[in-house]
Image: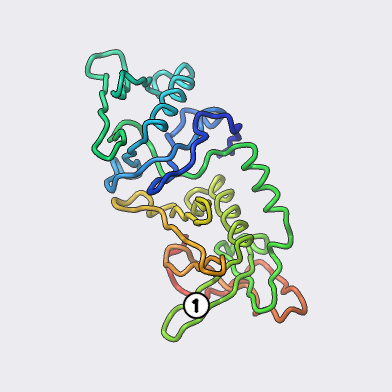
Amino acid sequence: MTTTILNAASPAALDLAAGEYWIELVPATHAEPHQISFPAVVEPRRHHGLWVRPRLRREVAEAVCKWLNLVYPVDPDWYPLARFEDDLLVVFTGDAPHQRHEIALGEDGRYPLGELGRWYLSAPTRTRDRFSRQLAVLRDPERHYPRPGETVVTCDPANLPVSGFPARIDTSPGQPPVPVFRPEIAEAVAVWCTTSHDTAPDDHPLVYFDGDTLIHVHQHLRSRDGYLPWRINPDPDGNYRIDGDEWTFHVVSEKSEGEVNPTMRPGDGRRAWSGSPA
């Protein structure tokens, strides 16, 4: 899939509010401006498997209306039209009376889209600034070098050495080892996963930041009823502990003593702990 780049002036230039995650409508074509993410609360139940049922704030619903009216002429059979009539959100999926869908404001102050549209859990919109930042992170060799006491780990052993990143490994009696990433390394891991997801969505999770919170969207679990992305908050030192089963890492090198950066070779990864592969 081709990565689409959008500018920051898109109608989806909105931030996440409490309890929201990024969602995206399956586009008719993978080209600007058809791939835009919107913030929404996601209901527990899915419809037809993967698709989520979003609940939108008024300002987000207005942005969705503007965007749908922008992309509608490209493929009227795919995209609906939408507008506000006072406080009523009206979505038109065709010209017939039964294809006029009136959505009233819910008790939570949001507009429930229900089964209207094939929306799925996604990541922030692919803006040019975001793409440039990701490129800079991926090109930074310092994010691959371990400091004393760190070990190189990977969640993608097939793509070593570029998928290897340094982490401190925390161990507790009777508990599986836990990788702990410095903030700049957590960013690099997130960028690696998300850019890999763009080309192989079944093999990689989506990972992004909401402020200081790391958000992990599992590529398979996201289709299950009740699933919500995993929110990983920084510890008191600002580092990120990956201590769940949804995101599996493998040891690539021995612990660094600060003398020589360990050499990483494809196929060197040794599984350090069990869990569902992400």
Please give the name of the residue rendered at 57% of the width and 61% of the height, measured from the top-left corner.
156
Q: In front: 3, or 67? A: 67
> Disc 1 marks which residue?
177
Q: Which quarter of the picture shows residue 49?
A: top left
Q: Is residue 273 above or below residue 21?
A: below
Looking at the picture, how far across and down is residue 185, in whole percent? 62, 62
Looking at the picture, how far across and down is residue 114, in whole percent? 28, 35
Quadrant in which the N terminus appears: top right
**Residue furthest right as drawn:** 259
Q: Is residue 56 above or below residue 244?
A: above
Residue 46 located left or right of residue 6: left
Q: In front: 174, or 21? A: 21
Looking at the picture, how far across and down is residue 258, in whole percent? 74, 78
Looking at the picture, how far across and down is residue 229, in whole percent? 41, 53
What SS does tag 1 mark?
loop
Please give the name of the residue rendered at 23% of the width and 14% of the height, measured from the top-left corner.
97
Please give the name of the residue rendered at 27% of the width and 46% of the height, measured from the top-left corner.
45
Residue 252 located left or right of residue 174: right
Identity of the amino acid at label 1? Pro
Q: Which quarter of the picture shows residue 180?
A: bottom right
Q: Callout 1: few (<14), some (14-19), or many (20+) C-alpha neighbours within 10 Å?
A: some
Q: How is the image coloured?
A: rainbow
